Image (cartoon, rainbow, N blue to C red):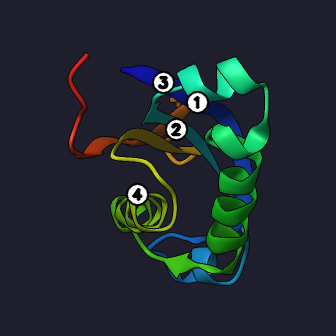
Amino acid sequence: MDIVYINDLKVDTVIGIFDWERRIRQTVSLDLEMAADIRRGAATDHIDDALDYKSIGKRVIAFIEQSEYQLVETLAEAVATLVLNEFPVPWLKLRLSKPGALRGARDVGVIIERGERPDG
C-alpha cells in the first residue's frame, strides 16, 4: 500500500463549545494520509492516473471553512467521511488538531483511521 499525504493543512473555521468560540474563527490543522496505488500515475506521469491531492485539499478546505462544529471529533469524522465518499480512497488516517486550545500545550486533537486498509 502506498500513501499520499497532506501535512499541516491549516484552515480557519468556527469550532468550539464555548459561546465566545461560536463568535470567532479559529485555526485547525489537518494531517491526512490516504491509501493509494501510485504505480499507474508514476508510469504515465499524468494526474488523471494519480490521486489528486490538490483536489482533495481544496475540497477539504472548502468544507472545513463552511463548517461550524463544536467538537474536533465531529469535524474529523465529517472530513474522513467526505474524503472516503468523494475520492478513490479506501483507507485514511487523519490527525486534526486545534492549536492553542489548552494552555501549556502546543495543540490538542484526535487521530482517526477509517476505511479498509489495503493489503500490500
Q: Amino acid at mark 4?
A: Ala
The numbered disc on residue 100 is none
Q: Earlier in the sequence, mark 1 or mark 4?
A: 1
Task: Label 1, secondary structure: give it.
Answer: strand
| Residue 67 picture quarter | bottom right
Across and down, in percent, residue 6 comes to 64, 34
Q: Earlier in the sequence, mark 2 or mark 4?
A: 2
Q: Quadrant of the N terminus?
A: top left
Q: Are marks 2 and 1 in contact (CB under 8 Å)?
A: yes
Q: Amino acid at mark 1?
A: Tyr
Residue in view at x 72 percent, y 70 percent? 62
Asked if residue 16 lies left or right of residue 29, the reply is left
Asked if residue 106 lies left or right of residue 116, the reply is right
Distance, label 3 to label 1, CA atoms, is: 6 Å
Q: Which residue is mark 4?
A: 80
Distance, label 2 to label 4, CA atoms, is: 9 Å
The numbered disc on residue 32 is 2
Task: Label 3, secondary structure: give it.
Answer: strand
Distance, label 2 to label 1, CA atoms, is: 5 Å
Distance, label 3 to label 2, CA atoms, is: 10 Å
Q: Which residue is mark 1?
A: 5
Q: Amino acid at mark 3?
A: Ile
Q: Earlier in the sequence, mark 2 or mark 1?
A: 1
Across and down, in percent, residue 82 comes to 46, 67
